[in-house]
Image (spheres, rainbow, N blue to C red):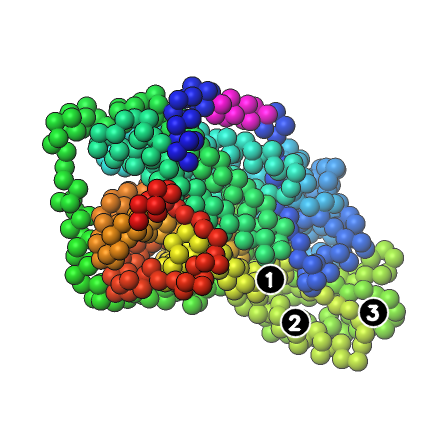
Amino acid sequence: MKALGRFAFRKKYYVIGFWLIALFGITAISQSVGSNFSDSFSLPGTDSTKALALLGKAFPAQAGDTETIVFHVKSGSVNDPAVKSAMQAVFAKEAQLPSVGIVKSPYDPQNALQVSKDQQTAYAPIVFRINARLIKNSEVQSLVNIGKAATTSNLEVEFGGQAVGQLNAPKGSPGEFIGIIAAGVILFISFGSFFAMLLPLGVALLALGTATGIVTLLTHAMGIASFAPILGSLIGLGVGVDYALFIVSRYRREIAQGVDPEDAAAKSIDTSGRAVLFAGATVCIALLGLFVLRLSFLNGVAVAASTTVLVTMAASLTLLPALFGVMKRRVHSRRSRKSIDSGTAKDHEQSIWAKWSRTVAKAPRSLTLGAIAVIVILAIPFFSLQLGSSDQGNNPKGTTTRSAYDLLAQGFGPGTNGPLQVIAALRTPADKVALQKVATVLASTPGIVEVSPVITSADGSVGLLQVIPTTGPQNIKTSQLIKRLRNSVIPQALAGSTTKIYVGGLTAIFDDFATVIGGKLPLFIGVIILLGCLLLLLAFRSLVIPLTAGIMNLFAAGASFGIVVAMFQWGWGQKLLNIGSGPIEAFLPVIMLAILFGLSMDYQVFLVSRMHEEWVHTKENGKAVIVGQTETGRIITSAALIMITVFSSFVFGGEKVIKEFGIGLASAVFIDAFVLRTILVPALMHLFGKSNWWIPKWLDKSLPHLSVEPAEVEVSA
């Protein structure tokens, strides 16, 4: 690693030039070819997937996504001649759009139930031939423009559905700019130098720009979700500033001790750089652990996020030492350089962190109990976690999707926003009789407000029932209804019959998605904890430290999820965040856990690697823990403050899922840095004593060596 630091320092302009060419070149190529993000996912073997396959085969014109045009009159009726004429003209124009399969007008006699009882609200489902992700934005915009053109002072026209939702989704997040500004302020306060502040910030932004271009290109090779760029920005800014901060801090420390700039650059890469390399690897391993879930939707997110981390790590290890070669001793302010030259620099042993480290050493038991109590209290809401998918009732007020959702709920009941589809393969006359029997049973089933007549495909091979629940799509009672229909109501109605009947529809698809992910969550947690602990075992040759780290990760996860549940599911953050309450996005726990476990391991590595370095020299556990916490405490908390600020700033974006990520990760980092690494971990290490560094000799000999510290540290021991 020293050789890498020296090479980058000496060949600084070549290295800087390489990164600038990479940034502008990759950005130009990615912009020229465009992006191809995809939010599609498959759930093989589930009821909803089987229903979708039958529907697509028998009703090809209705196999795509469904948008809903909702119209409401302030006075009079939707059946008034002027309103009826205007809306029929709208339906006729919508039906001519290339991707539209059918428009189900409420003015057709068979669709009379699409008009509310007070006749002031009506809706028309617009069924596409293809999935929403394949529809061009220009066509969706035309769909909306046609409807909005009919708006008058008395007639309100709104649109709901996935395609319109994607059209209105925010293209970026102001949180990026807020986070950058806030990070700059914290860095300036921490370093006291404008140039030192620019180093971590500049490297992080350059790496993020390069990684964004690479991810855009990757969308043409694999499916990557549309929220991946914002999530990548969130992770990239956080870890980018984090990694650069650790290396810059070590370089400043070496310069303060009078070390030659080139030697200081080499030393910083050989020490903090090794920790960055190790920490970055753990983040990537945690993210790539998403592959064990075998869900293509999450594979793309894992690759995109890992790519961002890898590029950020590479920039920190090569671009930073090159910039050190340009700045040399100017990483310190003029006043600091004068104090260093005159030998009047502050005594490290008298710092606030030195005093706090000694305080922890004196009262480890009481501090351990206090920290655990805080974690337990914060984690309480986690035990009521409900996974699902937020519907458009959570969109910001004023958007057409939110307005359409509210109008439907007010005019027809909340279940109209999430209809279920009961689909049967009709091979014999007995199958048709069975489906009709199911329709009769469903009509009297609690939790169902309406069941449509049986709709049969042109060839008579598939039958369809539209079922409207009494509750909305994200309500837990709707999820319970789906399970009850599948497990008891329909099987009992089909007793003695061989007819295959499936419960599908968008609401059922999202419910199946939550069920599949929830079932695989324990496996995922086990895999990433095991891999993380194995890496720490190899690095620190200890059994206690990896086990402690794994438990700390679970503590941070439980507490941060408790905060997310309270804010988003319990509704404590509705007014503050301008969102509706509802279930937590089904995929959020696994992605957030991957990121959290990786970041938690970062802090564990930075903290314990310095302790281990001191332990190797002195074999005194108490001194090693105090020195490690004293010398890394300020850096870890400064890095944490930056990450908390960056993550929190993303709540200013419009999408609920990004707000969930922002609040969840900001909470997790705060708990990890200020409760776990500042109090609980060092307190436990004082209590464990020399056991922290124990490993059976037979195991030590059989394991390969992977050191976070440079080789000369071990030699000197």
Give the quarter of the image for residue 563: bottom left
Q: Residue 31 location, x and y as percent? A: 58, 26
Q: In this figure, which residue is indicated by the disc labeled 1?
A: 516
Q: Is residue 346 above or below residue 327?
A: below
Q: Residue 65 location, x and y as percent? A: 68, 48
Q: Residue 96 location, x and y as percent? A: 75, 37
618 sits to left or right of 441: left
Residue range in magenta is: 18-29
Residue at 61% x, 30% y: name it. Answer: 34
In this orientation, which residue lies closer to the viewer: 174 or 110?
174
Residue at 79% x, 80% y: name it. Answer: 496
> What amino acid type is highlighted by mark number 2?
Leu
Which numbered disc flags the more N-terminal residue, 1 or 3? 3
Q: Residues within 10 Å of mark 2 (few under 14, many from 20)?
A: some
Label drawn at residue 432: 3
Labelled pair 2, 3 in contact (Cβ < 8 Å): no
Label drawn at residue 316: none
Label drawn at residue 485: 2
> What amino acid type is highlighted by mark number 1?
Val
Examine the structure image and report whether residue 23 is included in the region drawn in magenta: yes
Which numbered disc flags the more N-terminal residue, 2 or 3? 3
Q: Secondary structure at mark 1?
A: helix
Is residue 136 something one can see in this rendering?
A: yes
Which numbered disc flags the more N-terminal residue, 1 or 2? 2
Observer-side mark, 1 or 3, equals 1
Labelled pair 1, 2 in contact (Cβ < 8 Å): no
Is residue 142 something one can see in this rendering?
A: no
Observer-side mark, 2 or 3, equals 2
Observer-side mark, 1 or 2, equals 1
